[in-house]
Structure formats: C-alpha cells, structure tokens
Amino acid sequence: MNVTKEQLKQQIIEALNLEGMTPDDIQDDAPLFGEGLGLDSIDALELMMVFDKHYGIKLTDRNESKRVFASVNTMVEYIESKR
Amino acid sequence: MIIKVSDNIISPLGVGSEENFIRVSKGESMLRRHEDAEGLLQPYYASLFTERRVFSELCIEAAEEALWGCGVDASSDKVLFVVSTTKGEDLELYHSSEKIVKHFGNKNGVIVVSNACTSGVCAQITAARMLNTGKYDTAIVVGCDIQTPFIVSGFQSFKALSDELCRPFDGARRGLNLGEAAAAMILRRTDDIEEGQWEYVAGGIHNDANHISGPSRTGEGALRCLNDVRNGGFGDLAFVNLHGTASLYNDDMESVAINRAGLGEMPVNSLKGYYGHTMGAAGVLETIISMKAVEHNIVLGTRGLVTVGTVENVNASNENRSCGGNGFVKLLSGFGGSNAAVRWRIKR
Amino acid sequence: MRIVIDGKKVVLDGCQVETKECGEKMLTELYRRYVGDYPKFFKMDTLSKLGFIASELLLQREASLRGVERFVPSEERGVIMGNRSASIVNDREYEKTIQKGDYYPSPALFVYTLPNIVTGEIAIRNKFYGESGFYVVEDKETLMEIVRSSSMKAGIVGWVECRGRNDFEADVELI
C-alpha cells in the first residue's frame, strides 16, 4: 500500500469530522494541533485509531504520538518508516 | 435532617459493608490481571466478580440486604429509589433500573443518575434533596456497574488504563484499573438523630466548563464543590476521600483543587487500589467505607501509592493512619466536566 | 423561555422557526444558520447536537430580547437535563466499532456513550460553572421535580430524548 498525503488528509477529515474541509485546506507542514486545525486530545486518540485501522500501526505512547501527529509530513514519514 | 439508616456493599472482596471494610483495612484487594477470552481486548487489571453478575439482580441483592431489619417497606409510596450507574444492563439504563423498583413493588418509578463517574455522589445528593421536599420519607440509593468489553475497550481506546496495579497520587502512576461492585444506602428524613448515626451535611455538584474528557487543570469544578460543603469550615473532618483514579490528570487536578480549598494539610486517601474504579458504584461504595473508617478513627491507606507525585502536594500515605474528627468529604470527578462532593458527619 | 424541537419542527418562545430539513440534517441546518463558529458541533453525537442547538437558540434569543451579553462566565448558571433512553443511539454506534473481525474502538464515539456529555458540552460552550447533571427518568415531570429540588437558580433545563438520528425531541427551558 502506498500512502499518499492526499489519502491521509482525507482519512483525517473523515475520522475527525472536519466539516467543510477538503484535503487542499490542510498544509503538509502545518501543525495539526494547537494553532493549526485546533485539534484536541480526543482527536489525537482518534488519529491513533486511524493509524491502527488503515496502516496497522499501533501507537501507545502519548508522547511519541505527539511527535508523529505534528503535521501531515511527519505522519507520512512515520508510516513509511514502519513499512 | 437526612440520616443514613443502613448500607450494604457487594464486591469481589466480599458481601456486606463490614466484611468489605475489614478486608480493605487489612490491605486486601481483588485487583488482578485479566485476559479477554475472545482475545479482542488487551490484557487489563480489574477487580471483577469470579462469576458473571447481572446488574439488576446485583442491585436487588444489595438493596435487600441493606433493607433487612431496618423496618422500611420498600413498596411504600413514601419510598424513592435512586440508582447510580453509567451503563446498567444491556445499555438500557431505565429499563434495567426499573426492574429493581418493580421487584420491590414500588410504584414511584426510579430516578437513574447518569452523571458519568460522579453519579454515586450525585445520587446521594439527589436523594437527600428529594427527601427534603417532603414527598418521600426514605430513599434507597443503589450504585452499580458491571464491566463489559464495551467499557474496557472504551477506556483502552482512551489509553486510560494502567498496565499494572494502579498507584493513586504516585509520581509514577500510569492510569486506572476498572472494578465492579454494588453498594446501597438507605437514607431517611428525620427530626432526631441517635448516637453513632450519620447525618448528611451538604453536597455540591459543579461543572469544570473546560473539556468533555479532561479535567480542569485548575480544578474549577472540584473547588466549587468543596466550597459548597465547607459549611463554616473543615475543622471537624477526619479526612477527604478523593476520587484518586491514578490517572495522570485526575490526581493532579484533585491535588490542585484541595490545595486551593485550603486542604493541603488534610489527610486524604483513595480507595481505587482496593476496588479499582467501580464507576456508578464508586460514590456509594467509597462513602460507606469512609463512614466505617471514621467510626474506627482511621484514615485508610492509599493502596498502590509509594511516593506522592501530584502537581501539588497531598497528605496521603499507603498505610492506615489513626485520626480524630467526626466526618469526611467524598469527592468525585468525571467525563462531561462533572464534579461532585458530599459531606457526612457522625453523631458521637 | 422555552424551545420545543422534534424531528420536523422547532418552536422557540411560541414561534415556529423556519426549517427545510428534517432529523439530524435539520440540526445541522440550524447550526449553519444560527451558530456557525463552533466546529466541535460536528463531532457531537445526535443527543449532544440536539441539546446544544436548543441551548444556543434559547441563549441567542435571551441575548437579543434582554440585551444581555453572551459567553460571560457564570457561577450561578447550570445545565440539568434528562430523558428515558440515556445515550442509547451513540452507544449502539460505538458498539459497531468493537465487532469481532472489525475491532477498532473509537475514542471519539466512546466519550459520547454517557448522556451527561450533552450537559458538559453546553456548560463548556457557555462557561457555566453551576450544577450540571443528567437524569434518566420516566418523564419530564419527574425531571422537573428534581430540578426544583436542586440548588440551581438559573440556566438550561429540560428534556432531550434521542431514539435515532432522525427520531428525537427536546423540550428545554431557560430559567
């Protein structure tokens, strides 16, 4: 399976119910949390579920997930490093 | 005034409030590592009954035992049932709680308090208020939850469960353990109180107005609850029994709230190391155990605690300590930003 | 002041609010027209959306009628709600995420498997530090008995029943 940024953004939008957003609205290197999309702790947990469901990656450590979910770029890098 | 006339606990530790208190005071627990037969759930630590129990049956058993010998006709229209649960049976909270009142032939219907993990304290407060309206003489408060894959998977998805025995207030705490139990209290409105009886002093329920799954870092709701039960001062308290789930944020929040309330020196404890988090039962069960502890002049040790490591200091110990005082405060917090506190006093 | 919502109709303070859609889509329509700036709405379960919209319309109406400012933190105001079927609709949604062979428990759904979350959502939105509580009872009259016995003097109280994503009713008051 080849992960594209486009695909991942679509999965993020669907999983987090980011109503009215399209993949184009999410910058590859923009922070997802805090200032960025304004995501919160439940969104971070939901992204962990997305990683498990779509990529078979089980993240358990909250601190590690913070680094991985920094931006779309860091998420794709992490998925590819696990391949 | 509102007094407690009887109580009962059915837990994996034993049947009856006295039996439970004795085993807790000896430092015993039924928290064990469990593996799911279906293999879906990650292994988890919990205090579970050895045989699968049914919510409504367990509630009936707990209430029947509490009612025994206290001369209350549970079918009377002056008797109100208040049930505290988060999930009931098959997710049908009303229907499964209605089975309890129907069993006793009570026609008043049932009030189910579903305020997440604060339900057990909210149920006592609601019962006391309803008694004070004069419509009822007696309230039967029952708190109960049975653990299911539904609940365990949810807490696991929240990364809220510890992969070891829980360590309330400890600097190295890693999350909570779940538990199941049923606990019942019979409350009555009366004009006179006898020596050795417990009087409901005050209760408070407040929202953090902060986040649906994370407690306020400044303990806004919990602080307001403590202020509601301040009642002129905390001088005669033996201790404050905290929620103390051993989750990172809950225990930090409580440490902040009690310090803001001026209770930094007050002995505090958590009972989660004996029972795990029994959810809808927690408020009722922990209130009953705290009453027994005050009757025996001890602050029960916080099982699982080694070194206090909350953001603000708390006066907690893993050993039983002797104490004076004629009462205690029971504090809880939970999802939805809810917080609740209740204060009880014994007539010496 | 009172608002009554069912799957097809909204009556605020005695006047019908015009809507085109039905069911949950109607709640979204109301959100877009009257709120619009609170994207957390889309993460809520139907029960929370229902309670949230009811409280928003009441508080907006209050602000315009009495000229009071919204979003001022309030020590006094609280939220007490109740219904017959707790959070059953979202409970069933969460259950679907823990099926054998398709086991991916969703924390975003799990958090709404408690009926009191709707009261928390309203308290958070409006900075209400007063009492919040949820009661599963026979009918609205029983709920109002509980409310009258409580120490809450002001805030949002009422019935929010949700039996399906398009099968719900709310009867909520601002007191």
Image: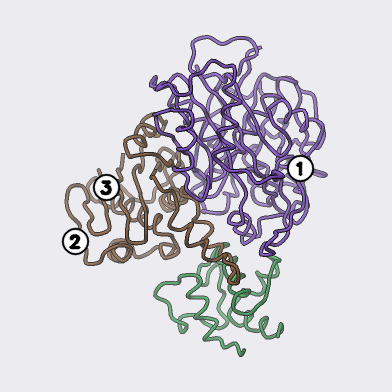
Chain colours: A green, B purple, C brown
Residue located beneath label 1 in the image: B30
Q: Amino acid at mark 2?
A: Glu
State which chain disc 2 sits on. C
Q: Secondary structure beneath disc 3? A: helix
Q: Amino acid at mark 1?
A: Met
Judge left or right: residue B124 versus residue B257.
left
**Mark 1 closeness class: few <14, some 14–19, many ≥20 residues within 10 Å:** many
The chain carrying label 3 is C
**Local SS, label 1:** loop
Vertical comparison of A36 with B36: above or below: below
The residue at 71%/66% (across/down) is A61
Residue of label 3: C62
Nearer to me, B318 or B124: B124
Mark closer to the observer (3, 1): 1
**Residues under numbered marks 2 and 1 in contact, where contact means CB atoms less than 8 Å apart:** no
Q: Is residue C113 visible?
A: yes
Find residue C18 and name its label. 2
10 Å crowding of disc 3: few (<14), some (14-19), many (20+) = some
The residue furthest left is C15
